Amino acid sequence: MRDKTNGRYMKYGLFLIVMFMLFVFPVLKPPLFFLSLLFTAYMYVALAESWNLMGGYTGYISLGHIAFFSTGAYTTAVFMNRFGVSPFATALLGGFFAAVLAALVGYPVLRLKGAYFTISSLLLAVVMQLIFMNWDFVGSSVGLWYKLLPVSIEINRMIFYEVMLFLATAITLIVRWVEKSKFGAGLIAIREDEDVAKTMGINSPWLKMKAFILGAFFAGVIGGVYGYYIAYVHPEVTFNINTSLLILLMSFFGGCRTWVGPLFGAIVLSLVNQLIVTFIGAEISRILYGMLLVVVIIFMPDGVIHYIRGLFVHRKIRHGDSIL
Amino acid sequence: MLEGIEVSKKFGGLKALTNLNFSVEKGQIVGLIGPNGSGKTTLFNVITGFYPADSGKVLFKGKEITRCKPYEIAKLGIARTFQIVRPLLGLNVLDNVTTAVLYGRDNIGTMAKGRGRALELLEFVGLDKKKNAQAINLVSAERKKLELARALAIRPEFLLLDETFSGLNEAEVQDAIKLIFRIRDELGITIFLIEHVMKAVMETCDRIIVIQYGIKLAEGTPEEVSRNQNVIEAYLGKRRTC
Amino acid sequence: MTLSYIIESIISGILLGGIYAILSVGFGLTWGTMKVLNISHSVFAVLGAFVSYWLFVKLKVDPILSLPLIVIILFSSGAIIYKLVIRPVQRAKDVIMASMVATFGVAIVVENVMSYFWRPDPRILKPAYASSSIFLGEISISQGPLIGFIMAICAISLLYWFLNHTYIGKGVQATWQNPIGAALVGINQERVSLITFGLSIASAGAAGVAMALIYAFYPSVQSIWTLFVFLVTIVGGVGSVIGTGLAGLLIGSIIGICAAFLPFVWVNVLLFALLLVILLFKPEGLFGN
């Protein structure tokens, strides 16, 4: 018992130390490249964790996450561009609009299962992209620019770094809490067998809706900050289908049954992805992650962490275990 | 306690249930038997809200539940098991039951309390030693026990059992019969069960309803039913010739 | 806006619809029978277009003449993808979802390999006859879409004939209707799967050539084609060859009629919104069983 408590203190201690080091990292004046590398990694952590509420726990694989992300980005862009309000003030509003959108489309779309749900979610993103491309109020195919913060580029990057680190930490902790709560247990039961879940008294439409809205809210807030970070929103940038796929791959790569999987997958793959894009080329990077997606689905559908653990304990991984 | 009035259900042109009347009194164990494809499982699915009835009514404790959703029916206190057991394969035994405890009628908010209650239920069905096993690694008899524990976890007043005895060996059937009686006597739960294992039906049931092609053929005590000429022809007779 | 303009617009819509039908028929076949939802379907259509383009540009081989070669090359690519990706994925718990995610990976790989070697620039397949038109009174019909349409009709008929009137084709159908029965009479399921998948990819390749006669193509156009494949397949009912053909013609007509009155982007918005509505209220499709 005493060992267990000690172990827990060790864990909390380690967590606090790591968080502290990450928060003070920009003070060491690292090259800007490192800050943007980590900013993007944090962003993908936050996105993958928020996607995992539906994709991992509930087993509803969405390719529409970028629609909510973009809703957030466009909300802050429009407020800054038209009314001069700071995106940091309106990011939560972006999350709110994304949540409203999720509630509206969720009602019909969440009745669909499997591939039909996935295709509908993809279509949501495509239809929105086409509409935004032709909607003058949101800048149509020209896009919208943000006014930059009146500070040096170093300070600017530092601010965004801290904001995104905070968001990623908060979202990961919330998702971790959901996983270990009654809410998470209900979502997992829906993934395992939705009919059985209903016989347990689980109101599955409502539970799915809550998870969908919560995930969309997070994506909206992240999108709101991201738009300000790149200082520009455009339908082809924010609604990029490759972003949706990358989020999916990160979660599957790490393992979408637990909160650790998307965290691990997002950090590793976003760093690898950015390094390859920067130093070799975007096409090579996409070829590699396409291959990785195939390999993960075939050989380790429960994620690399689970796979490696399986190698050590010689537990035979059976197909009933996996999400797919 | 549970009452069906003129319940009908069609699939396309196929009449699965036709104007079926039935009732189950509180504290009874009632059997539902009939040849394969006679509409037994369809009736369970109608009662539990998985299929909407085309016409007729289902009443539970005098209240109509015909249009209720499956989870609402569970909350009212009707639990069920599935013919082919459906454990949540990705979870361990304890978590399977815990989830049902959390969302069942006790409406427990914390995982710790839920686990405590789930463990009691696993002890009740005799599966507590396997609490940390993955559901996928259980053998058939253990899966059936898990299915029962999970059904009991919502703290039902009424339990629908779909072929709980099939696929069990002689000793396991005896165990299961004892368990059924304990569920009724110790937990005070009324039981409605579909069964093919005649020995178990004859031993456990106070009353038996026989259906064929979705129509009620006979109803009565086990002795009455086993002497009924229609039933012998339609069902028991066929068995003897095999 | 004259009447002849509207008629022309409808005719070109129908021609286009026929091509969408052949682009989709193989996709619906693998989804409906093998339970393999192949997102990489359209990327192989683009690959077919590229091979045809290079044969035409470098070796001056006419796209119509090179078509059989395209079909053979694409069938072989399909067989390779089957062995490497589809066969292992068929062991998953949920084959449809697993194949969908895995073939998303295949689509990304093939798209970016093409884009790496051949650049992402738009290209168009333009043999001399494709740019001229034939006239029926005041109505002109471009020959490019017409030839594409004829190719599409031939390919669909051929596929339909193959499935219903040849020994292997009947074996394919038998296996998907009753796998155990087919195994008992000695049909090799793996071989049948391979042939089904190969044919599906081959039909995509042929469709890609037909598409290239009308539209500019580039590696990333595959994602737009994929959306049209979803549209036609789901409207037609998954797995129905005839339903897919009808859905292609219907959608083509809608495109033709709308294109006469609306800017093209809004036609797409309308179509994909229509698909969303069908998914929600009639997911078995308009012409499904």
Image (cartoon, rainbow, N blue to C red):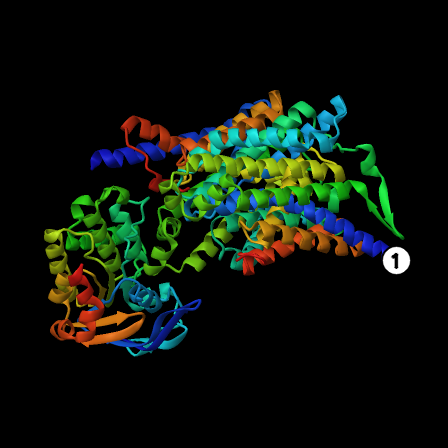
Binning the other alpha carbons within 10 Å of mark 1 as few (below 14), some (14 to 19) or many (20 upward) gives few
Toward which corner of the image does residue C176 lie, by quadrant? top left
- Chain to which mark 1 belongs: C
Is label 1 in a helix, a strand or a loop? loop
Extreme residue toward the right, this view: C138
Closest to the observer, C92 or A301: C92
Toward which corner of the image does residue C53 lie, by quadrant? top right
Closest to the observer, A117 or A238: A117
Quarter that holds the C terminus of chain B: bottom left
Q: Residue at x 22, y 67 (%)?
A: B33
Q: Position of residue B233 (x, y in %)?
A: 20, 70
Amino acid type indicated by mark 1 = Thr
Q: Residue at x 55, y 48 (%)?
A: A119
Q: Is residue B179 above or below residue A40?
A: below
Q: Is residue A146 visible?
A: no
Q: Which residue is mark 1?
A: C2
Seen in the image, is A152 located left or right of residue C200?
right
Q: How many marks?
A: 1
Q: Is residue A231 above or below residue A133?
A: above
Seen in the image, is C50 located left or right of residue A110?
right
Q: Position of residue A193 (x, y in %)?
A: 36, 52
Closest to the observer, B127 or C23: C23
Q: Position of residue B61 (x, y in %)?
A: 28, 76
Q: Is residue A212 above or below residue B213?
A: above
Quarter that holds the N terminus of chain B: bottom left
Toward which corner of the image does residue B153 lie, by quadrant? bottom left
